[in-house]
Amino acid sequence: MKEKINEFLELWGSDLWESTIQTFQMVGISLAFSILIGLPLGVLLVLTRPGKALGNKFFYQALNAFINIIRSVPFIILLFFILPFTKMIVGTSIGVKGVIVPLVVYTAPYIARLMESALLEVDRGVLEAYEAMGIKTRHIIWHVLIRESRSSIILGLTIATIGLIGASAMAGLVGGGGLGDLAYRYGHLRYEVDVMYITVILLIILVQGLQSAGNRLAARLKKD
């Protein structure tokens, strides 16, 4: 058994390492941009609802419809649909760089919706108390909305990250790199089933680790 493991690592170790690093790059960079876009969108969804601080029925409905439209498109279709846009932004549609744009377009609206749900959980009485004291909306956003819902935000981001890992694996079908690309090229096309099994195991470990870390962090923030 030990000899088989050593033989496998000698044959596939470097490819597995490179693919794992590519997956971390895709997920990390895409998540960062998705949060920068998704969190403000989530705040806007809450503040522009009728009856809220910046209530604007038409803006809210337009933004709500736009997010629903993007979220309704499966990632693999979205990936092909925005290929020209991706190539215009980053200059390529393959490799790690080529899947960042579609991953962000796919994940940012999802994060926005998760953030909206988390922010709406904040006690209305707490918001009214701060508003009655004349505190500006921008301060309420950071010191009340986000602070009070940070535990739910962390759980939402954990869910979004796990979904992003799954999307990055699908990107391997079109030469996006990462563990999905390795599993497709060798595990599927060349019938190297050992590579497929190891890839699946690595993805499971990654997802389980992220979910556990997210749950612990959310629980800790909830106590503070």
Image (spheres, rainbow, N blue to C red):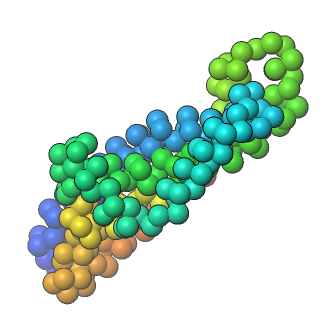
Q: 66 above or below 172?
A: above
Give the left or right position of residue 33, taking residue 220 as reference: left
Location of residue 202 in the rendering, given as x and y in whole percent from the top left corner? 35, 67
Residue 21 visible here: no
Where the C terminus falls, by quadrant?
top right
| 9 or 130: nearer the viewer | 130
- Count of numbered marks: 0
Relative to residue 220, is residue 133 drawn left or right?
A: right
Q: Is residue 48 visible?
A: yes
Furthest-top residue in this view: 134
Q: What quarter of the picture does the N terminus occupy?
A: bottom left
* In this rendering, position of residue 13 left or right of residue 101: left
Quarter of the image where one finds residue 221: top right
Determine the residue positioned at 18% across, 77% down. 186
Q: Residue at x 24, y 75 (%)?
A: 184
Residue 55 rendering spot, x and y as whole percentages: 73, 32
Q: Nearer the viewer, residue 106 or 144?
A: 106
Residue at position x 60%, y 40% in the image: 42
Instruction: Classify 44 as above or below 95.
Output: above
Q: Is residue 188 above or below residue 60?
A: below
Q: Quadrant of residue 133?
A: top right
Compared to 82, does 203 lie above or below?
below
Residue 5, horizontal then vertical, whole percent: 21, 76
Residue extending farthest to the front is 58
